[in-house]
Image (tube, coloured by chain):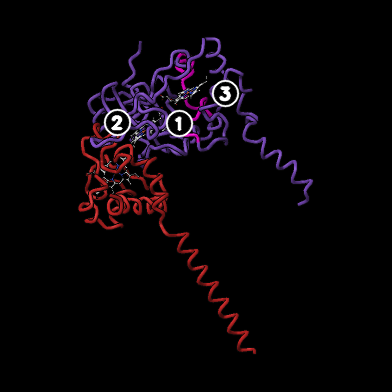
Chain colours: A purple, B red
Amino acid sequence: MTKRTYLPLLTLLLAWPVVPVAGFAEEIPAAANLCLTCHQVTVESDRAVQGAPPLFYAGNKFNRDWLESWLQTPTRIRPAGGFFADHIITSEGGDSIDTASLAPHPSVDSAAAKQLSDWLMSLRPHDQLIAESSEYSPAPISPRLGAMDFVKFKGCGGCHRDTPEYGGVSGPELYTAWQRLQPEFIVSYIKNPRAWNQQSSMPDRNLQDEQIHKLVNYLKSLHKED
Amino acid sequence: MRLARNHASILAQASLMVATLCWSVLATASDADNGRILYRNNCSQCHGLKGTGKGINAPHLEVAPRNHTDHDEMIARTDEELFKAISEGGQSVNKSVLMPNWGKTLSPEEIEDLVAYLRVLCCQEQ
């Protein structure tokens, strides 16, 4: 290859991570500039970002209503922050969460929230992953058996809370999962966490589709309609 | 003359072989430093950043995570047993299901790196 053929290639390579992938994304709105400082919003850039959840597949993940309202009045979802290991105090008695190191999430006004949600919901690079996930239709489940399955048999409660008071703290709270997340995303994520997030600290527990559907039924049952 | 040249080429070949051997041993040897990073990302949430079994999730688990700095407990297990517990989960070694299976999440090489790091935790660090 000559120098001349290298140059455009090099330019392409340098420009590539910041150019939104055609067909997937709307133009990034100006209000998103702040978001880019913490979150991964393009498919291939910043693989190493670990301190904030990736948003580049937001349209495959979130319920839009929840997203738009949360951006205006954000509350904590991960008790130990974006990446737990960055927010731990270690002492003789064991590890505890360094709550002082957890900053509140920036909020935006309703107009910006609407614009940001339009953009975020257009980010759907994982349509294929969703299409490949097993077909799920909600079914009722006994709260007692559901809780026992979640905590004792599948061990999800070791890292996740299924009520505001009960459960592990390294993962996102799941008593709000049904409100926040698309059901197909929940199914697909439990099946293979690293297909969604290379950095995920959640193990693939090798569950059968029916076992996953049962867990998702339980998460749905935790949602109180208001 | 010819003999000398042969000697030289044999010597060159031999040193090349030694170099290749060293390199491949280095490349395949499990890497406790990589294990340390994997441990922080995946295991510390329950076993603690220091490996003492007191991670942030430990108070919320019905069975206490193993203290990986407990020298006597840890030397009672072979590398193969540790590999199996990590890869296939607590249930596979008659322990709690709360110890997850990592074999679908981490590669065999990564699990070997973790075993190497467990050996540092239990038996090299004070």
Q: Which residues are magenta?
A: A49-69
Q: Which of the chains bears the disc numbered 3?
A: A
Q: Amino acid at mark 1?
A: Gly
Q: Earlier in the sequence, mark 3 or mark 1?
A: 1
Instruction: Classify residue B22 as left or right of residue A26.
Output: left
Tell me if residue A50 is in the magenta stretch: yes
* Secondary element type, mark 3: loop
Q: CA distance from mark 2 to mark 3?
A: 38 Å
Do callouts 2 and 3 mark residues in contact (Cβ within 8 Å)?
no
Q: Report the front residue among B83 and A149.
A: B83
Q: Can residue A29 be spotted in the picture?
A: yes
Residue located beneath label 2 in the image: A96
Q: Residue at x 55, y 28 (%)?
A: A41
Number of the label disc, if any, that sits on residue A51: 1
Residue A176 figure quarter: top left
